[in-house]
Amino acid sequence: MNANYYDSRKAKIQLTISRVVVYAILIFLSVLCLFSFYMLFVNATRSNADLQGGFRLLPSNYFLKNLVNAWNDASINIPRGLLNSFIVASCTAVLSTYFSALTAYGIHAYDFKLKKAAFTFVMAVMVIPNQVSAVGFYQMCVKLGWTNSYIPLIVPSIAAPVVFFYMKQYMESVLPMEIVDAARVDGSGEFRTFNTIILPMLKPALAVQMIFNFVLSWNNYFMPALLLDKAEMKTVPLMIAQLRSADYSKFDMGKVYMFILLAILPVVVVYIILSKSIIKGVTAGSVKG
């Protein structure tokens, strides 16, 4: 009995030590990841003269002044850039996620002769880099008059092989075909079944892919740089890139840090909002299981 007691106590101590080590590593990695964001915020609260003085860990009191200067800057219209990026990124995230889920549902729920060939074709498209077709795509946009337009930045995003593959794999793990068959027996149409029954079941996966696609589109620089020339059409990455040509000896560095802070803030907000949906969906699934 004493031997069992000591073995049990030793196992509990080892488990406690393992948990402490794991939590310590996680806390260290979290601090390491968040430190750069914290320093960005700190630098956005400092004046240009203060920044020239070197590193400082505590915030200063120039936040509102830098915000006003950045928001009203004549050379870089950051409010317009934020609006442009939000339009492109939100439309891209919604359309690519929805149509990829719809395509994955078609491959998953229906049996037809070219099912495997269709899946193989989509997977083959996934390994082709966007830069390979950039020149031809740009020439096509010029002929169609789509330069300085958001159409070529949004519409092609509907075809997202990576999102399709993720959604199909998720459907195979959480979507029983009995639910689809029951809906068909009850007289529900295919699109109604997908929109009212299937999509709510895919909420965690949809939230994940919407986050990834929103961030990917928000940070996209390559295609907007090719297609957008007008200042009022430029997105945030293009405006931030303009800072590289600035004379930093005559530039307000506090305003630069505020530009960068404003550029990443919407991404953080969207992630926080959708991450709640992910946690809620995973929790609901574990309770049902």
Image: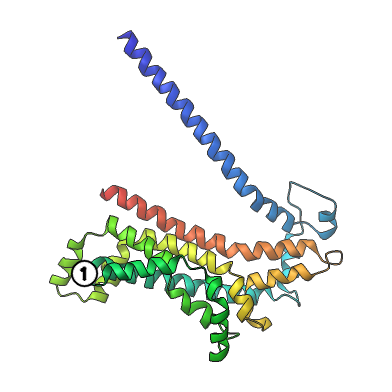
The residue at the far top in this view is: 2
Left or right: where 135 falls relative to 273: right
Task: State the image coordinates of residue 14 (x, y, percent, origin top left).
Answer: 44, 23
Question: Quadrant of residue 165 in the image?
Answer: bottom left
Q: Position of residue 250 (x, y in %)?
A: 86, 67
Residue in the foreground of this view, choosing between 50 and 35: 35
Residue 256's quadrant in the figure?
A: bottom right
Asked whether 261 or 118 is in front, the reply is 118
- Identify the residue at image location x=76%, y=67%: 244
Q: Which residue was labeled with disc 1?
A: 111
Q: Residue furthest left?
A: 185
- Quadrant in the picture for the N terminus: top left
- Measuring from the top left, give residue 286's x and y in whole percent: 31, 48
Marker count (numbered): 1
Dot 1, how many residues are within 10 Å of its Cα: few (below 14), some (14-19), or many (20+)? Answer: few
Q: Residue at left 60%, top 43%? A: 31
Q: Secondary structure at mark 1?
A: loop
* Drawn side of residue 142 relative to residue 231, left or right: left
What residue type is disc 1 on?
Asp
Quick one: 56 or 193, which is closer to the camera?
193
Residue 289 vertical placement versus 272 (above, below): above
Relative to 281, 131 lies left or right: right
Q: Note whether residue 229 is visible.
A: yes
